[in-house]
């Protein structure tokens, strides 16, 4: 972020850039997660009852 501050002279653009990157990362984490694997429960057969 230092190069942005030195080139623009203000922190605003750097904070906006970092905020946008954080928001994009948060959205990616929400939509990029997988559904947990489901374990099959064994069914009892008629002979076991």
Image (cartoon, grey):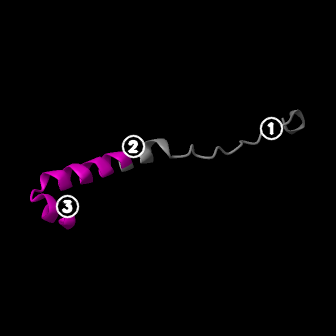
* Residue 8 image point, x, y percent: 13, 58
- In the image, 35 versus 31, the foreground residue is 31
Q: Where, quadrant-wise, is the N terminus in this rendering? A: bottom left
Q: Which mark is residue 4?
A: 3
The answer for how far apart the CA atoms under marks 2 and 1 are is 43 Å
Q: Residue at x 16, y 62 (%)?
A: 7
Q: Where, quadrant-wise, is the C terminus in this rendering? A: top right
Q: Is residue 26 above or below residue 9?
A: above
Residue range (magenta): 1-24
Horizontal side, residue 25 vs residue 47: left or right:
left
Q: Residue at x 19, y 56 (%)?
A: 14
First in sequence: mark 2 vs mark 1: 2
Q: Is label 2 in a helix, a strand or a loop?
A: helix
* Residue 29 image point, x, y percent: 43, 48
Horizontal side, residue 11 vs residue 22: left or right:
left
Horizontal side, residue 36 vs residue 18: left or right:
right
């Amino acid at each position: 972020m230092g190069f942005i501050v030195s080139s623009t002279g203000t922190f605003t653009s750097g904070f906006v850039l970092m905020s946008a990157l954080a928001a994009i990362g948060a959205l990616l984490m929400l939509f990029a997660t997988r559904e947990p694997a489901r374990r099959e429960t064994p069914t009892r057969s008629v002979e076991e009852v």
